Image: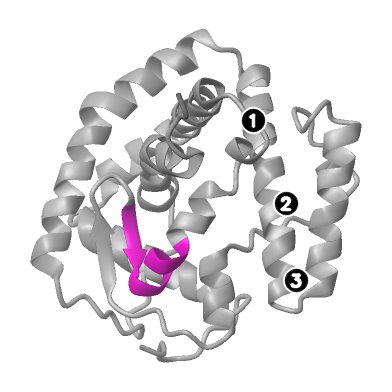
Amino acid sequence: MKYPSRSGLKSLVCASLVLVLQGCASTPAPSGNAQVNDPIEGFNRTMFGFNEKVDENVLKPVATGYKNVVPSPARTGVTNFHNNFEDAWSAVNSLFQLKFEHAASDTMRVLVNTTLGFGGLLDWGSEMRLQRYNEDFGQTLGYWGMGEGAYVVWPLLGPSTARDSVALPLDLTAGPGLVIESTAISISAAALNVVNTRANLLDTTALLDDIVLDKYIFVRDGFLQRRRSQVYDGNPPDAPKN
């Protein structure tokens, strides 16, 4: 019997990872001058609340137990392993954006970390001062002029924009599932990455909960500012193109 496609399975497992990375991580302070295109705020707030409950009742308790049991070097190895796949995808997107220097740096990181770092468990690329550029397909679409569109919060998938929603299937697929033939192992690796990433952010999100009055606004504005900065390599225009 043929298993379901790895992209579909991995999208389900990695959904929480996107929530963690984009919704829970520390974000830049919102800019008062930035335009916010949030026409479905009511829906977005409902989804944001749902995602917060999932995090509070599932992800956070599991991540806390994981952090208490798994030593820091092992957690770092898991982070490095998945970062190696992100670097490979970043190199591809840098080529799409004609950023050849970025592509070369990310490619060298992948080669070094895969060969000398035991498949990416060790990050020798950073020790060699090879820069990570973190390019994704959403940034590629923005580079070629596609406007970010409306802000949207997807259940489990977390904060996004119309443009990033188009790119999301490809961005989610670019991971260990591309080279791991076993569906079960691929899902397990993705689930481990979800828990590991959330564990790494426990202290950050605890601080966020303590200092933010309206967490939805803070996450939304910080996410949009960060994405605009990424698309425009740290120099976004005053007003986003929608």
Secondary structure state at the residue bearing disc 2: helix
State whether residue 72 is above or below residue 130: above
Considering the image in quadrants, where does the N terminus appear? top left
How far from the left and from the top, in percent, is residue 188? 50, 22
Q: Which residue has dot 3 on it?
A: 95
Q: Residues within 10 Å of mark 2 (few under 14, many from 20)?
A: many
Instruction: Using the numbered discs, state the Cα–Cα distance from disc 1 to disc 2 in whole angstroms.
Output: 15 Å
Secondary structure state at the residue bearing disc 3: helix
Q: Which residue has dot 2 on it?
A: 88
Give the number of marks.
3
Residues drawn in magenta: 158-167
| Sequence order check, earlier mark of 3 and 1 | 3
Tag 3 and tag 2, C-beta contact below 8 Å: no
Q: Residues within 10 Å of mark 3 (few under 14, many from 20)?
A: some
Using the rendered view, name the quadrant where residue 75 is placed.
top right
Depth check: 161 or 178 in front?
178
- Residue 239 seen in the current view: yes
Q: Which mark is residue 180?
A: 1
